[in-house]
Image (tube, coloured by chain):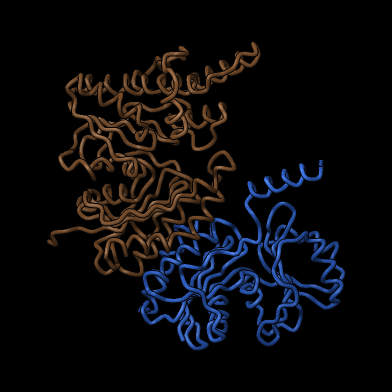
Amino acid sequence: MKEDIVLLAIESSCDETAAAVVKNGREVLSNVIYSQIALHTEYGGVVPEIASRKHIEKINQVIRQALSEAGKTLQDLDGIAVTYGPGLVGALLVGVSEAKAISFATGLPLIGIHHIEGHVSANYIENKDLEPPFVCLVASGGHSHLVIVKDYGEYEIIGRTRDDAAGEAFDKVARAIGLGYPGGPKIDKLSKEGNPDAIPFPRAKVDENEYDFSFSGLKSAVLNYLNACQMKGEEVNRADVAASFQKAVIDVLVEHSMHAVKSFGFNKFAIAGGVASNSSLRKAFEERCAKEGVQFYHPSPIFCTDNAAMIGAAGYYEFIKGVRSGYDLNAVPGLKLGER
Amino acid sequence: MKILGIDSSGLVASVAVAEDGVLLGEYTTNYKKTHSQTLLPMLDELKKMIELDLGTLDAIAISAGPGSFTGLRIGSATAKGLGLALDKPLVEVPTLEGLAYNLWGCSDLVCPIMDARRNQVYTGIYECNDGLRVVMDQNAMDVRDLLAELEKLGRRVVFLGDGVGAYRSVIREECKVPFAFAPAHMNAQRAGAIAALGEVYFAQGKVVSADEHGPEYLRKSQAEREKEERGKGSADGV
């Protein structure tokens, strides 16, 4: 058997057009991301049709650049991994159709990858010692999942959000206090100037499942607070609102995650997804894990955002298990983690 | 000269290979499955049937719009991926020209119409009696404006395309010139027409690189339209 497995990975599930070349699941030879954030900012969020149009415009250049930065041609590769869900269907279809065509033209095997599996696997890139099993919190604009990674490619979701995703709550609160889109990095930055204990926003518990999240109540509490201030003619300290809101989100994420780590008896914990690049969140987890004697892993911010390197990392483990997709691979916007 | 033709702009998914005036094979379906599930398996089947060596293709002709936004992108991403991997150029065939080319040899005007929703059709007017001549270039318009345009031209016309189903009664009631509807084997998109017209355009040097190709939507996204309308509204209000 050939020693090294080199994959081209493609990701277009939302508003980043991305391609990467990854060796053996852990060594990133290139990681090209064309971010559309500026395009969507004026609409206050991602516009699916605009995202899809931009993907088709950029995808070939992004793939070419990924190959050239890695110093590889298609002939040097062993396979192609592509995100096929979950995400925006029109956006996913660009990457899926492109990947299938390249696979067809070259004869390279095709591996359809779950976007969240990619986020989880981003942790393998910089943490060479990390191996399953471990608990992983995936938090982004579209997802909030608490997952037990039993083995490579084997997942059990033990908690999920009942309403808004964590990143979605950040976006909505950021809009309410006039920070604009995307909310996560803006709230993270402003929070550093505010007092996280200034306003006692609620920490929501979900009765039926102790690992589930709910952020809509918190979001409403922030909006009510802003309304009340306006009615009373009081000036709002936006930094305090941002810091207190962020603390409320982080407290819930940390408590639920640590509860899961303890209850299921793990000693390794990882975070992933866009929200995982929040500096206060990382610091809170670092401190708590150190205190509890749990090994804490997190990707660098560039691997937290939507990227294709993480799809290449996940793709490698599916590839060596023998997972292959057919030319009829379709985009599955509501794809469940662990299902194919 | 060997050209692969692809059309997934509407309900039809179709792939074909033409070589020097001979259609080697064509696979066309008009079924409920998504193009993402059908297009490449069909191409794979066609490739096996005609023992196609992809490396011998001169270009990939793609039905480049207008049409269903998602359908167009499935076709375009497929063509771009093939072009990138095979290092072949693309030939962009306007969807309505491809449709009209189905009726090559017709002495009447040819008018393909596609349902564009929002009370509009994507349409164009063509002469196909010897090659293809554009009388009215493809665009999105109200079907009644199209009928007025045809009345001005004052010639018999043949309609085809998936818009016929949606607008048959309007045409029957309001078309002022003699008309006919094309039958099943030539009234929808066919990649054979895209490949054949692709051969003509390729010979004329009308090629683009796989990287620069993108569909011609003929319409902005809803979000952009609404934003422009809002902008216009405030400007008018000043």
Nearest the eye: B124 or B185: B124
Name the image quarter holding residue A135. top left
Rendered view: B211 above or below A111:
below
- Side of B225 relative to B144 (left or right): left
What residue sits 34% from the left and 18% below the top? A210
Quadrant, the C terminus of chain A: top left
Rendered view: A22 above or below B180:
above
Q: Position of residue B150 (x, y in %)?
A: 82, 71
What residue sits 54% from the left and 59% below the top? B71
Name the image quarter holding residue A148. top left
Rendered view: A191 above or below A199:
below
Q: Position of residue A164 (x, y in %)?
A: 48, 28
Shade representing chain B: blue
- Side of A210 relative to B62 (left or right): left
Among the chains pictured, the one given brown colouring is A
Name the image quarter holding residue B135. bottom right
Q: Position of residue A230 (x, y in %)?
A: 63, 16
In the picture as drawn, the residue positioned furthest to the front comes out as A193
Q: Position of residue B35 (x, y in %)?
A: 49, 59
Total numbered labels placed on residues in the image: 0
What residue sits 42% from the left and 80% below the top? B57
Nearest the eye: A170 or A283: A283
Quadrant, the N terminus of chain A: bottom left
